[in-house]
Image (cartoon, rainbow, N blue to C red):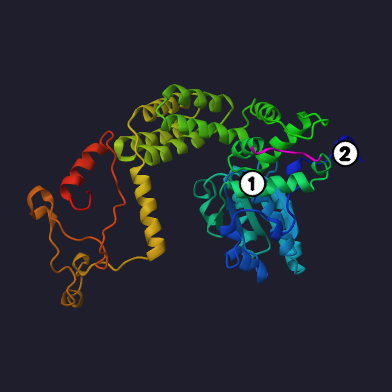
Amino acid sequence: MSSTSLLSKNLPPLAERVRPQILPDFIGQTELLHENSLLTRAVVIDQPFSLIFWGPPGTGKTTLARILANEFNSDFFELSAILNGVKDVREVLKKGTSNFKDGKRSILFIDEIHRFTKSQQDALLHSVEEGSIILIGATTENPSFEVISPLLSRCRVFRLYPLNEENLMQILKRAINEDIILSQRNLAIDSDVQSLILNSCGGDARKMLNTLELAVSLHSEKNAKLLQDDIEEALQQKNIIYDKTGDYHYDVISAFIKSIRGSDPDAAVYWLAVMIEGGEKPEFIARRLIILASEDIGNAEPYAIQLATAGFDAVNKIGMPEGRIILAQITTYLACVPKSNAAYKAIDNALKLVSVKGAGSVPVHLRNATTKLMESEGYGKNYQYTHSFDNHFIKQNYFPENFTDLPVFYNPEDEGREKFLKERLDKLWKDRYK
């Protein structure tokens, strides 16, 4: 049978055709699925639990949910928060209760669970609590903001990350070699075309496979070699319309953030307009601005996070279309002010050290002697109260006593207000900031 005749069979998209069905075939997310991980051990001991997969598109959330349902030998129900309402949820919960009484498991997978209203999420609580439904939610948004606390407390949250180049390469090769259509094309892809496919998807396997499938459909069957022009044409066709639930949604927010980070207010406002015109939730944009104000600006302009937070509150209060003015004000201000990611790097560096070496013991002189016993043990002894000294500073140790080479986590930049902080720290801690 030729590939042309296969195309007429109304087969599902490539990403669906090559979706793995068993855990050993799943590619990526090794931190979640290594031998001693919580998920792997749950499968081994056959003990499912309610959970939420949080991560960007195309990282395996839906695939993992379906695989887990098979591993746990459960009835599997799948709903979309975009397409299904409370009535659909209640029907599934009713089936789950019936199965529970018969000693059968039921897994309910809800895609885009962050789009469920509070009442829709409330409807899940009792069934999840009693165990008649094992809930697997998938979300691209931070569950702390979008999932109600009672439901969140009943679920474990697992973070999924964009796939790396090695993962994507494995998925690409499997699609070309094993797909019912592509395997008959005997496609040849040189390294430049391959790199273009991998680099254009941002760690999103589904986007990569959709691009590949569209490129193949544009490509002449007479030529076995896939061309760079085919990929570029496929990418251009995919990015014509803004879809707040699709791939381009994430491409645009990425361009928006990077434009602000790059201090280009005009480009930033352009991408803001694209999102607003496409019907993007203003709260989604405002949240990203708060994160950026701390991650990319930080102490170079401490007022930035105050303005971004106030903007989020204002957008919530007045809504759209007037909210566009507030978003534009915050966007242009954040784009124009000095930038620094020193605070962001500081906490990541500190977390890395603590995760490797553990938490050190608090020096005795920094401990409060709140009882006579503590005082007799020397708690607080030799602590020097900084406000009793000139310039409200006295050099003393604040790290665990076993630290010999004191680490430097925070390195202020010579930008904006952070320049003053850098000069002050250089003066106070001369030996540390050499």
- Main SS category, magenta section: loop
Q: Judge left or right: residue 318 versus residue 365.
A: right
Please report the residue visible at 23 percent of the width from the left and 42 percent of the height from the top. Answer: 422
Instruction: Find the residue positioned furthest to the right.
Output: 1
Q: Which residue is mark 2?
A: 6
Please report the residue visible at 64 percent of the width from the left and 50 percent of the height from the top. Answer: 61
Please report the residue visible at 39 percent of the width from the left and 38 percent of the height from the top. Answer: 296
Q: Which residue is mark 1?
A: 168
User: Does the magenta-highlighted stretch encompass residue 221?
Assistant: no
Between the C-alphas of marks 2 and 1, the distance is: 25 Å
User: Does the magenta-highlighted stretch encompass residue 188?
Assistant: yes
* Disc 1 residue crowd, few under 14, some 14–19, many 20+, Cα 10 Å: many
Residue 213 x %, y %: 74, 36
Residue 244 in view (yes/no) = no
Answer with mark 2 or mark 1, whichever residue precedes in sequence.
Answer: 2
Amino acid type of disc 2?
Leu
Q: Secondary structure at mark 2?
A: helix
Amino acid type of disc 1?
Leu
Residue 176 x %, y %: 75, 44
| Magenta segment boundaries in residue numbering | 186-191
Residue 315 in view (yes/no) = yes
Label 2 with label 1: CB-CB less than 8 Å: no
Q: Splitting the image into 4 quarters, where does residue 154 fall?
A: bottom right
* Disc 2 residue crowd, few under 14, some 14–19, many 20+, Cα 10 Å: few
Q: Nearer the viewer, mark 2 or mark 1?
A: 1
Residue 243 x %, y %: 63, 31
